[in-house]
Image: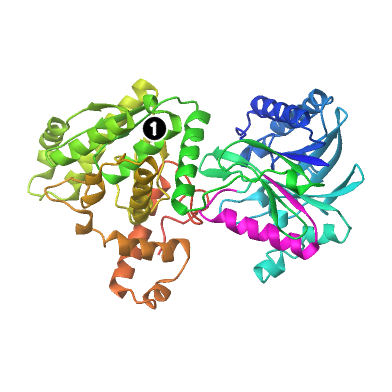
């Protein structure tokens, strides 16, 4: 038997496009010998659909499309399709799947375990399916699970998140193979964990396990694909592409006939691929073809420009230089050199006259008050206004360039450099920004990011001889503290116990708290770590 894992990139609620992808993939898989196809979780509607699930007409449209898919794939092989399914309880759904065969929906299945942590909020929409189902297909008993259903093994985690284990239940019903329809978001290193879970389950229950994952970017989430199959001893026997659509046909009778894609699991390679894919999909799925960003000659805007150029093509990226009297000649040279290296267009809009106009207008109001961060923020807001004007006029999405370290402690200007439609690197710590730039240069075999950008001290250049370290701890120390405090959830006392200066820890924690109102108004960012400032970060703004 050959089972095709349809690793697809759906657009949320684009039922026509998604169904076309599904039908086309089933046809291709059938022509390549597949006996059965399975999609990822919620593949017809796209994941995560969030509050679209409250729209009853959308749910009805999904089922109508499923019937259409059944009719149009009748001459091909059967399909297990992920979609929302109505429950008998009013206004509640199952995160489900339907077996389609001979032109008709035949059997429904559902997700038993509903995650309600980090970016997941499934108990808001779904009821848990009472029992995992199985499908008798060509003499083989297939156990059907959906995403979280396989993430509850007590032996792997040392304890269960949920009282019920769908895989254990299916194994008790003597199934021959476990299938999993998944939409598991990417974070750095997560695929290695997934692989270990699949291996542990297969070995424990002596069952092959086939895993079909979604790929692509939907809002802040990125899905890396990497659909795969392990045999009953937990050995990897097939694996699809990473960060790209793919059809992986798994021969479960002869494992030697299968394809195993080679992946680079280094943090830099994974982060780069994820950010490029996330940027491309966010821009295109939001209906844009072009982007622009401010080019300062600094490390952050340089990395963002490189990501954007790779994501949607350099011909669709515009870099805007906005020098002030505090901008060094080296920074201007670095920005222009970067643009040449990436082959992107630039325009230059000096802001000195605009700064003078603001000073003159505000002079009566500010009389007798010394210059401070107010004047620095005005520069950033002038630039934000110029960039948004170009964005409006050219119908190009504005990319913001702030990194995670800056966003964490509020070292950014609301309505200034935070203005825009997508924050590409808002989940990338400053030290990782440097690592990614060096990695990119090594991959390309030349300095795409000018060496001088990597060597000069980071600076916002909003006043003479300004350096980031005038206001912040060195990033090498700050990022370690932020990793412990934000991503690991350690308390201030726990971090101090690791040898950090207590006054520094308290200062950083206070900066993180005070910057919450900025993050609340920031554009969406691309999540690549376990704890990002996005849909999984829900902190109160007004608090002690």
**Residue 498's quadrant in the figure?**
bottom left
**Residue 11's quadrant in the figure?**
top right
Q: Is residue 315 above or below residue 439?
A: above
Answer yes or no: is residue 193 visible: yes
User: Which residue is outermost to the top?
Assistant: 393
State the residue in front, 352 or 378. Answer: 352
Tell me how many marks there are.
1
Q: Is residue 286 left or right of residue 26?
A: left
Answer yes or no: is residue 94 visible: no
Residue 150, image x and y in percent? 71, 56
Q: Which residue is mark 1?
A: 309
Q: Is residue 498 left or right of residue 6?
A: left
Assign the N terminus to one quadrant of the image.
top right
Q: Is residue 319 left or right of residue 45?
A: left
State the residue in front, 86 or 104. Answer: 104
State the residue in front, 463 or 527. Answer: 527
Q: Is residue 168 above or below residue 353?
A: below
- Residue 203 within the magenta-colored segment of the rendering: yes
Residue at (80, 57) in percent of width and height: 207
What range is drawn magenta here? 185-212
Q: Is residue 462 left or right of residue 289?
A: left
User: Disc 1 on helix, strand or loop?
Assistant: helix
Assign the C terminus to one quadrant of the image.
bottom left
- For mark 1, does the 10 Å Cα neighbourhood hold few (<14), some (14 to 19), or many (20 or more) residues? many
Residue at (40, 47) in percent of width and height: 426
- Residue 25 within the magenta-colored segment of the rendering: no
User: Which residue is outermost to the right?
Assistant: 139
Residue at (84, 26) in percent of width and height: 74
């Amino acid at each position: 038997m050959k089972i095709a894992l349809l690793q697809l990139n759906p657009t949320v609620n684009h039922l026509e496009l998604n169904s076309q992808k599904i039908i086309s993939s089933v046809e291709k898989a059938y022509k390549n010998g597949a006996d059965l196809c399975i999609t990822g979780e919620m593949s017809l509607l796209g994941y995560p659909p969030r509050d679209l699930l409250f729209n009853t007409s959308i749910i009805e449209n999904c089922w109508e499309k499923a019937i259409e898919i059944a009719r149009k794939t009748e001459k091909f092989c059967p399909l297990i399709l992920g979609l929302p399914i109505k429950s008998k309880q009013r206004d509640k759904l199952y995160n489900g799947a339907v077996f389609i065969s001979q032109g008709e929906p035949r059997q429904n299945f559902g997700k038993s375990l509903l995650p309600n942590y980090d970016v997941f909020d499934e108990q808001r929409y779904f009821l848990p399916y009472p029992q995992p189902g199985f499908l008798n297909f060509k003499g083989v008993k297939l156990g059907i699970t959906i995403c979280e259903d396989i993430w509850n093994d007590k032996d792997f985690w040392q304890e269960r998140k949920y009282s019920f284990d769908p895989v254990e239940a299916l194994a008790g019903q003597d199934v021959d193979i476990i299938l999993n329809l998944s939409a598991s978001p990417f974070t750095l290193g997560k695929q290695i964990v997934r692989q270990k879970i699949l291996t542990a389950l297969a070995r424990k229950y002596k069952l092959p396990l086939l895993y079909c994952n979604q790929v692509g970017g939907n809002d802040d989430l990125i899905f890396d694909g990497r659909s795969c199959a392990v045999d009953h001893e937990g050995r990897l026997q097939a694996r699809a592409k990473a960060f790209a659509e793919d059809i992986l046909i798994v021969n479960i009778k002869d494992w030697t006939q299968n394809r195993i894609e080679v992946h680079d699991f280094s943090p830099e390679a994974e982060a780069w691929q994820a950010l490029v894919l996330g940027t491309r999909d966010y821009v295109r799925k939001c209906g844009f073809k072009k982007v622009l960003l401010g080019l300062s000659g600094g490390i952050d805007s340089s990395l963002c420009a490189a990501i954007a150029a790779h994501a949607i093509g350099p011909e669709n990226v515009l870099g805007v230089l906005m020098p002030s009297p505090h901008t060094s000649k080296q920074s201007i040279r670095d920005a222009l050199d970067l643009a040449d290296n990436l082959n992107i267009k630039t325009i230059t809009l000096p802001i000195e006259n605009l700064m003078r106009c603001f000073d003159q207008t505000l002079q009566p109001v500010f009389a007798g008050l010394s210059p401070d961060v107010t004047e620095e923020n005005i520069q950033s807001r002038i630039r934000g206004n110029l960039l948004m004007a170009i964005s409006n006029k050219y119908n190009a999405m504005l990319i913001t360039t702030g990194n995670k370290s800056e966003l964490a402690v509020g070292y950014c200007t609301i309505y200034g450099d935070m203005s825009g439609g997508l924050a590409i690197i808002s989940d990338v710590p400053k030290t990782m920004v440097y690592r990614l730039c060096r990695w990119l240069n090594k991959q390309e075999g030349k300095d795409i990011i000018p060496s001088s950008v990597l060597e000069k001290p980071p600076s916002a250049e909003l006043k003479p001889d300004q350096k980031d370290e005038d206001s912040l701890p060195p990033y090498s120390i700050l990022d370690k503290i932020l990793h412990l405090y934000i991503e690991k959830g350690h308390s201030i006392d726990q971090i101090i116990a690791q040898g950090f200066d207590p006054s520094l820890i308290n200062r950083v924690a206070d900066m993180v708290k005070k910057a919450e109102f900025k993050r609340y108004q920031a554009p969406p960012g691309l999540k690549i770590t376990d704890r990002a400032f996005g849909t999984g970060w829900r902190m109160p703004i007004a608090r002690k």
